[in-house]
Amino acid sequence: MSHSFDTLKSLVQQLPLTVLEEHADEQMLIVEAPTSGIHNLVLDCEDDILVIEQVIAKLAQPDADCLRTLLQINRETVHGALCLDETGRTLIFRDTLQLENIDLNELEGSINALSLMLAEHADQLITYARQGGDVA
């Protein structure tokens, strides 16, 4: 197990998160904080980068208005961004942090940014998710 993964686990223990799964061989944690909108948040140590991802929703065929709105939400998001998977139909929150000097404030800030974005744009995101048939 790497020092970075140990550091990540230590930081997660200091936050109001529940570890749902730990995959030490892949250096990955899956966590939640349901009251903050955090569900199956993936924390994945990839070399010297921490990749933070949470599926937000499955989308129907996103049109130009939907994509424009998502880009506008990105502009307001403090850390991380909304993105689409390779199919263009799964909306994901994604952030990356350097593992070399990661600290509690950085990790907490990224997770809080996700929670804040979800709270501020819940109605719009739920509308898109319902159109796609799946609220994550």
Image (tube, rainbow, N blue to C red):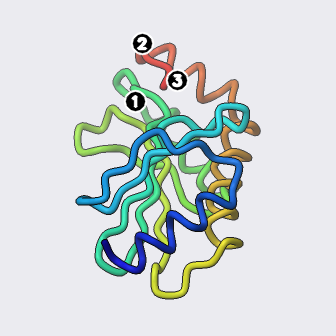
Disc 2/disc 1 C-alpha distance (Å): 13 Å
Q: In this figure, which residue is indicated by the disc labeled 1?
A: 62
Tell me the CA gap for discs 3 and 2: 9 Å
Asked whether disc 2 touches disc 1, contact meaning CB atoms under 8 Å apart, the reply is no
Q: Which residue is mark 3?
A: 128
Counting other residues with Cα less than 10 Å from the Cα at mark 2, is it few (<14), some (14-19), or many (20 or more)? few
| Front: mark 3 or 2 | 2
- The residue that label 2 is drawn on is 133
128 or 22, which is in the foreground? Answer: 22
Amino acid at pointer 3: Tyr
- Front: mark 2 or 1: 2
Q: Secondary structure at mark 2?
A: loop
Q: Residues within 10 Å of mark 1 (few under 14, many from 20)?
A: some
Q: Is residue 26 above or below residue 20?
A: below
Viewer-closest of 77 and 42: 42
Q: Earlier in the sequence, mark 3 or mark 2?
A: 3
Decide: few, some or many residues near mark 3? Use Cα within 10 Å; few <14, some 14-19, many ≥20: many
Under mark 2, the amino acid is Gly
